[in-house]
Amino acid sequence: MPRTVELVSYNPEWPKIFQQEARLIADIFSNELVSIHHIGSTAIPNMLAKPIIDIMGVVREIERVELYNGSMIKLGYTPRGEYGIPERRYFIKATQGIRSHHVHMYPVGHRNISLHLDFRDYLQEHPKQAKAYIQFKKDLAQQYRQDPSAYSEAKTEFVESTNKLAARWRKKKKLGRI
């Protein structure tokens, strides 16, 4: 079955689904795991999203993640290696061809960790930007309904500009100005 872009209204169950899956993943990676986070649109209340829970794990040594591939497979995940992002390990969980979870593993200090967390936190704290993102995603979903890769690529500029705003916001917040 070909993948399509399906956006749905925010589901208040998503944080619970994340917590359940995060516990299972934490059990697998045990002492290798430093932290685990709910990221992406399903982590932002009231955000329109593809109904896929994005999970980000931070690990001590990225090279050791492959040692846990067998356990992740038993949990229903398909390991995809770096999948285009150096020093990331990526896993996809699907049931009958429908994706439900993505897991992104990064080593401590990887720049994508703060990008994901700052983007999520910024949109949680800035409803105008979140509403703009919702409308942007709706427009793109109509345009690229049959092409999920093009949909994701088309979001890049918006995401990068929001990441710049989020980084400045985070820096000011750390300095106590927000």
Image (cartoon, rainbow, N blue to C red):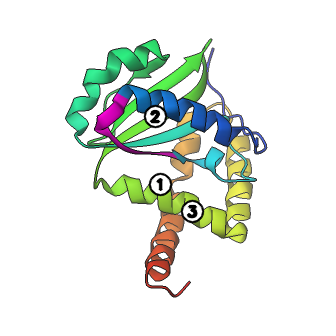
Which sits earlier in the primary sequence, circle 1 or circle 3? 1
Quarter of the figure with the C terminus: bottom right
Q: Residue at image x 72%, y 50%?
A: 139
What is the C-alpha distance between the residues marked 2 and 3?
Answer: 19 Å
- In reply to whether residue 33 is colored magenta, the answer given is yes
- In this rendering, position of residue 62 left or right of residue 132: left
Q: Residue at image x 50%, y 54%?
A: 156
SS type, badge 2: strand
Quarter of the figure with the N terminus: top right
**Numbered range of the magenta stretch:** 29-37
Which sits earlier in the primary sequence, circle 1 or circle 2? 2
**Seen from this angle, which residue lies furthest bottom?**
177
Q: Which residue has dot 1 on it? A: 116
CB atoms of marks 2 and 3 within 8 Å = no
Which sits earlier in the primary sequence, circle 2 or circle 3? 2
Q: Can you see residue 162?
A: yes
Q: Residue at image x 25%, y 43%?
A: 60
Q: Percent from the top left, x then y, of residue 176?
A: 49, 85
Q: Residue at image x 65%, y 68%?
A: 125
SS type, badge 1: helix
Q: Amino acid at mark 1?
A: His
What is the C-alpha distance between the residues marked 1 and 2?
Answer: 13 Å
Q: Which residue has dot 3 on it? A: 121
Dot label at residue 103? 2
Q: Pick the residue in front: 71 or 139.
A: 71
